[in-house]
Amino acid sequence: MKKLLFAFFVLCSMLLWCQQEPSILINKSIYSSRDGYLISNPYHSIYDSMGWLWVLGENKISNEYVFGDKEIIIQRFDGAIFFNLSLPDTFDKRIKEGHFFKHKEKGLYLKLYYTDDRAELFFIDTETLQITPVDAYNHLSKKYIISKEFQVNNETRLIITSEEKFYSAVLVGLGLRILDSIPFDRPVKNPFLEEIRNTEASTIVKLLFIKEGILLNKQGKITKKIVSTDFIDNQGHTFYPNEIHNSFAVNNEYFFYLDDYENVFKFDPKNTKFIEIPNTSESYALKKDMVFDNNFENGFLNEVVSDYSEVKFYDFNGFHPQITSKIQIKNYSKTAYNQFGKDLVVLNGNTLESYGFMNSKIKTFLRGKSIRTIKKLSENKYIVATDTEGVYTINTKDNTEEKIKFTLDNKEISMNYSRDIYVNEDHTITINDSDNLYTTDANYKVIKDKSLKIIGEEIIKIEDTIFTADQRGIISKFSINEKKYTKIPNTESVQIREFATNGTRLFATTVANGIFEYENGSFETHVFENEKAENLLSINYLQDYGILVSTKFGKIYTYDSDKKSLKLLYEDPLKASIVGMVTDNSNNLWLNTYAGIVSVNRSTQKIGRYTVKDGVYELEGNRYSTYKNPEGNIWMGSYRGLSYFNPNELSTIELNAQPQFTSISYFDTELNRWKAHSSPRFLDSIQTISLPSEYQRFSATMSVFGQIDRNDIAYKYRLSEKGNDSDWFTSYPGKEILFANLAPGEYTLQVKAVSASNEKIGNTIELRVISEKIFYKTWWFILALILLAFGTVSYLFYQYKGRQKILVKNEIALNEAKIKTSMMLEIHHRIKNNLQIVSGLLGLQMINSANEELKLKLQDSQSRIESIAGIHNLLYNSDNFETLSFKQNVNNIIKYYQILFPKKVIYTLNFDSSMLPIDKATPLSLLLNELISNSHKHAFSEEEQPEIHINFIKTDANYEFKYLDNGNFKMEGIKKESMGMKIIEMMNTQLKGDLKIDNSNGFKCTLIFS
């Protein structure tokens, strides 16, 4: 009896040890400052309606280097990348705490608590990221002390307290409206509020330490005050609860835990009574503190264990919660979730842990063991052989595993390296190891006369014949009826990988000989041009596909036994080795590969891949270990466990997710600076960005929002110039894609998300990018440059032609001028010569004349002619025929008179460098000639030291001529009759000058002309 009890205890222990774990898959990601998470002391976190996580807390950097006040920041998290958002201006108020709460779909409220001031409320537009003070709340009268928010449908409600009243209010954007109020029974100095509890029809509000409470309807109106008679226990006693712990709903009825009562209290909305329900104390401690989802179908509980806490997740089925999974977190962590029970974020210090939860439809048995072959024993019972750890039975209903004890002559024997198992009609089992082929009864006792020594591990049964193969070569066959074991001749060099049969013919993949084919005592081997023999791996006959052959590199061929050829049927995108092939009841192909389990839909050719994230314990499959039972359930073995699933339930996962841009950074010409745009409204509306020629670069980040593990995602992207497709590149979550030094042109950025099995997730997102040309490469600049060059050339040509015309005209004019100059020179020369001839004739006349008076007159005439001739001589020897230097002519006149009159006269000349026109020089020279002549004739007869002073200067527009001598010339009586004086008057008239003569002290003549 003791032995039986001991055996029963061992069996139960084994069964309990093998009990399958809950089929919840948990994926976990950890983020810290290395990943951009900058908060070291989180205050609060919340998900917005678009799937972004918002975190409020102290900046880690300020905590490390600043004592006293810490910088408070907000970070947004898309599941891979963190984005910073500036806090609103708090005007130097010291923030001590804060939290978010939701408002409808596109907004959040942020409530900040200050050390020395009342709390303030801000509205965050989660589409534009604008943060605006809610002045309607912030400017409330100071009599309003405490407020608590809660949600009713899509409205954000507030309960506000003063020392005298409850107030019911609603927040609408930046506005606040008081809906109702009711006074306390007596003033309360600190009217703190308990957690607000909601039911379908009412909201229950209670003060924390005072027996004051109210009920509100869904419109926010106060329907009544709660009193002690509203709460009735099993004994019929009424009481006023000090604390309302929790509430939950079952079948639309609401239940509450009050004070220390372990039974629940049912809320009756008609008479607003809370009545204790007997015999409902089951799981009291659990449900009292559980946090439920909105539908009360799931819940979680945070329990402090010791130096850590356990977060346990439950399916809440009425009053009987069932645990589904649990995780361990640090104590005092903050948590948030987007979809209850499907994700969880845990914040502690500078660590953010992100959890994802998913129900697995794949069961795993025999974890850690290398699986070889599976066969069904009974309805829920299977026999499974491993490589080196024996043979097991598995019960899929009870999720139990039990190792089989094989006996021979009442002694236990080991059973390893079995390649196949056959359950016979008489319930005996045929199984092999490396050296023996055994037949056992239903109790796993070896039947000796049905067992024999064999050569080789590989076996297959065709009708009454069992074929065996040694991996080193030699194929043998055993006839069950004849009990005869013989070798097949000439098979010593044929090394078998795996057998298959269509029921009559034997097929096999070999190590180096291609496909082995045997029928009626003869065999052939076939190699192929389209696949190397050494690449062939697994082989199987499937009713609707025929003979399928897989390879080491992820290809499946159909083998045509008539044409002896291979035709490609499937190629794995990951080129993973395929070690097993089977079809489901819909004739879809299921593959056991080195990269998980793969399904191929026969009609759509759509591929599904199932990996660790889907519950596959080990990705690397094992040969010989793929099996489908008559009900259509599939088993697939690996080196470390056995997967079991219903292919109808494990259909290709429809990923309810969509990739999105979470930031686009480029030089914004409107803002005139580099800008990282991360607001959802901008990202949803932007279709095209323009890059200025001096900043031809941009970057982008992406994320996938939805129920998916972002760590299993990759991003394929390419930037294609218009008209040209480029290659796809790969990026991963948390990485930024950057493009720089783009050539001018129009581009399209395409991004698609793919799963770990290379399945496309959602739609491809696109962004049009225009890289502007550098101004000197733009068509308008080139056109302007061409026009400018053409204009310049035209202008220069026009100028050249004009200058050529001018040069021709100048050359003609120059020739004409030269001719005129020559003519003028000739004229002046001839005039001078003629005048000198005349002067010479007058001189001859003077010599031949005896009349002194005539001589004097001839001499005067000669001097005048010489004066005129001197001017023409100067002009003849000058390059300028218009003006001449009067000083030169004066010197010639003086020299003439110095020769004519022997008396020595001192000449004092004062001339500037001005030139005198020819029409002025001639009359002035004649005037000077007459003055000098008169001085010599009439003024110096009695003067011992005669002097003549001549001044000629130009002042402004006038010429000033002065003539002085120190003689005693008297001009009275002869003024009008003197020929010289007449000439002086005539010359003055010709010069249009102002002539003044003064002889009070010598002779002085002043002439001013223009």
Image: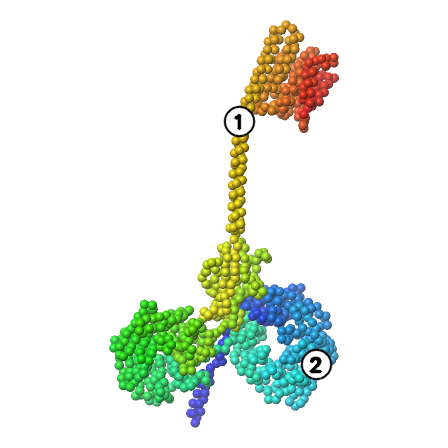
Residue 604, numbered circle: none
Q: From the top left corner, tell me how far across and down residue 471 is, in percent.
A: 31, 76
Q: Say whether residue 370 is visible.
A: no
Of residues 814 and 497, the one drawn nearer to the viewer in this rendering: 814
Q: From the top left corner, tell me how far across and down residue 196 is, in percent.
A: 65, 78
- In this image, 845 relative to 532: left or right? right
How far apart are the two marked residues, 2 and 1, measured between alpha carbons?
A: 125 Å
Residue 211 location, quadrant: bottom right
- Residue pictured at 56% horizontal, 82% vertical: 316
Q: Height in image: 874 above or below 727? A: above
Residue 815, numbered circle: 1
Please state which of the two labelled residues, at mark 2 or mark 1, is closer to the viewer: 1
- What coloring was used for the rendering? rainbow
- Residue pictured at 54% horizontal, 65% vertical: 662
In which quadrant will I find the C terminus? top right
Dot 1 amino acid type: Asn
Dot 2 amino acid type: Lys
Please report whichever mark, 2 or 1, sits nearer to the chain's N-terminal start. 2
- Residue pictured at 33% horizontal, 78% vertical: 501
Residue 605 location, quadrant: bottom left
Q: Which element type, helix, strand or loop, lies under badge 1?
A: helix
Q: From the top left corner, tell me how far across and down residue 789 is, in percent.
A: 52, 43
Q: Which residue is mark 2?
A: 224
> For the residue carrying disc 1, how many other residues have a C-alpha within 10 Å: few (<14), some (14-19), or many (20+)?
few
In which quadrant will I find the N terminus? bottom left
Residue with the most extreme top position: 850
Residue with the most extreme bottom position: 1
Of residues 2 and 924, the one drawn nearer to the viewer in this rendering: 924
- In this image, 459 relative to 366: left or right? left
Q: Height in image: 29 above or below 863? A: below
Residue 329 location, quadrant: bottom right
